[in-house]
Image (cartoon, rainbow, N blue to C red):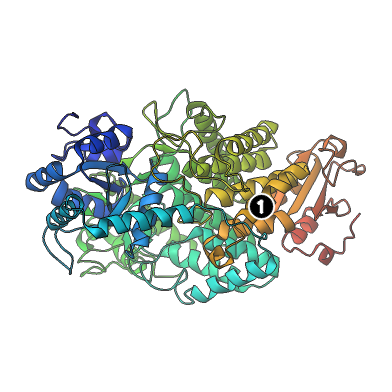
Amino acid sequence: MAAPENLLARETSPYLLQHAANPVHWRPWGKAALDEAKAANKPIMVSIGYAACHWCHVMAHESFEDPATAALMNSLFVNIKIDREERPDIDHIYMSALHALGEQGGWPLTMFTTPDGTPFWGGTYFPPEPRWGRPSFRQVLQGVANAFHNGAEAVTQNTKALTQHLAQQATAVPGEAPGPAQLEAVAQTYLRMTDPENGGLRGAPKFPNPPIFRFLWQNAFRTGQPEALDAVHLMLERMSQGGIYDHLGGGYARYSTDDIWLVPHFEKMLYDNAQILDLLALAHTHRPNPLYAQRADETVGWLMRDMSAQRIDGLAAFAASEDADSEGEEGRFYVWTEAEIDALLGVASAAFKRTYDVRSAGNWEGKTILQRVTPQGAPDQEAALARSRDVLFHAREMRVRPGWDDKVLADWNGLTIAALARASSVFDRPAWLDRARDAFDFILTNMAASHGGVDHAWRHGRVAASGMIEDQAAMARAALALHEATGEVRFLATAERLANAAEAAFADGHGGFYSTAADASDVPLTRPRSAADNVTPSGNGMMAEVFARLFHLTGQSEWHDRAVAVLKAFGGQPDQLTGMPCLLAAADLLEEAASVVIVGEPASALVRVALSAPDPAVVVLRSADTGALPADHPAYGKAAGPHDSVAYVCRRQVCSLPITDASVLSRILGSRDTNSAGLSAC
């Protein structure tokens, strides 16, 4: 018989540890908890959330910390608490089940299952008393337990239907690889969804949705149509001046609750800021904007200052998130009153208040969320505002900080490393590249998996979750970004190793990949398999990109074939491609990428231009001479001439004449029409 106690104190996840003192007899996810439920013939109550989740905290305070509610939970259920960031595979299964039940997803996710983990009913947040047309959590607990033990027909029907639904979701439906018609159809669908006034997608709440806008950006270079580029610029400009951005400490919150980017849920996630940094760099090199440069600088400053996780042997990766709440109140750390600002800034207060929308009544619940409402001023005005921000920042540092989730997630770090590599080139910040290299080496050193890839979650010297396909893909993608940015061969070799490890441990036999490795023993029902992007790119979409980049870097047809196989694995359901922007971007990269081969001086102006190309479908390969290139590469053996450095731009296995002028290379990489620069192929 399992101990009648809360077992979460043994875990490393900050989210699980937040619940370690609850009177609920929580168990972590695993075989032991499932065996306990089977032995006791009790249904399971699975509660899934994450450390920075505001409504997770609310439900915890209202229900999980309440002794009477906890006693009811303990008597009726085996209760399992899951950190969705540690176990996105389990979260995906139960969130998919919730959607199949016709419920809107979100966290906390509350799922009720049979003793073997099969879901039969669920929801998200439940209030402690009946409210908003929803039953109380205690009513839900009693009703679900009665239905389970009395053999309610609905329980049997739901378990059967949900099992079939989840199995169908994971079933391969291969077809043709997406082509230009599919890419254009999806792009037009997204463009119709964009907000022409405030940027982003229409409506509220408003999320940045980086995978969607990254695809729109890349597709615009394929088509030559400016509408998508303008949509990305508009979103970045509005977000970067809105309340979703932290104007004092840097970094973007997860989303805004309104449609004008003013009121965020104040949590800051590593994955959002990584992907937004990448977009800022692409947008800046396309249309230079001091706003983008400033926001990139401030956001990387926040990453380095506040988001560096535990350092081991001189290396550190990045932490997962910062909370929305402090002192039990959402946003308390970030908001201001007019009186506070007047007291701190004195004579400088009036100009600051005009600029950042500080009002006597506030702009949110009687307080002020800082947002920039005036255009860029003269240099002396901007310098004065910077001094005021610095005063407020240091005053804010004296407040009680929000909670910090310092676990290291390989996939989110992979996104961050790749973004830093690009941004370091665009904004000429070599220290950012050094920091990316440190994070990469930390993960390869401390989170190496037995199958040759990487594990998923690490904290305080312990691996807390095995690797998933997103981890292998994001880290392989990061390795390629570092290889292109540094020219170091070791990163290319690591990318190839990670790609092969993913193939061995995660392949589905149809060209795609399961989320979990073949030896995963605690995944209920079926191994998840999807190419749909969420707030982060899917593992299958990133694997397709990795294979495509490896093909363009090496010229080896094996990588091309693997990329095509992933694309075909999800091509049989064309109506679902709208949810797969990362996969579609990989399809474009495979067929249309510019492979820029630079021969000679490794730090030449040609290298800097290539690494700062605005089109994401550019791959940069450096070589001492063309004879040292892989034999299968289309630029192999081409004469470089007497110049210190030359570049070839190769598309569809055909290369341009040698380019020695950085301005010419820049012009070519700003468009996919090589002939627009007057160059003939050779």
Name the residue: 30% across, 45% down. 51
Picture quadrant of residue 28: top left
Picture quadrant of residue 348: bottom left
In the image, farthest residue toward the left: 68
Secondary structure of the residue carrying numbered label 1: loop
Mark 1, other Cα within 10 Å: few <14 / some 14–19 / many ≥20: many
Percent coordinates x, y for residue 652 in the rendering: 80, 56
Q: Is residue 249 visible?
A: no
Name the residue: 87% across, 36% down. 627
Picture quadrant of residue 583: bottom right
Q: Nearer the viewer, residue 213 or 396?
A: 213
Percent coordinates x, y for residue 636 in the rendering: 86, 42
Task: Judge left or right: residue 598 versus residue 200.
Answer: right
At label 1, the amino acid type is Ser
In the image, farthest residue toward the top: 313
Q: Is residue 589 visible?
A: yes
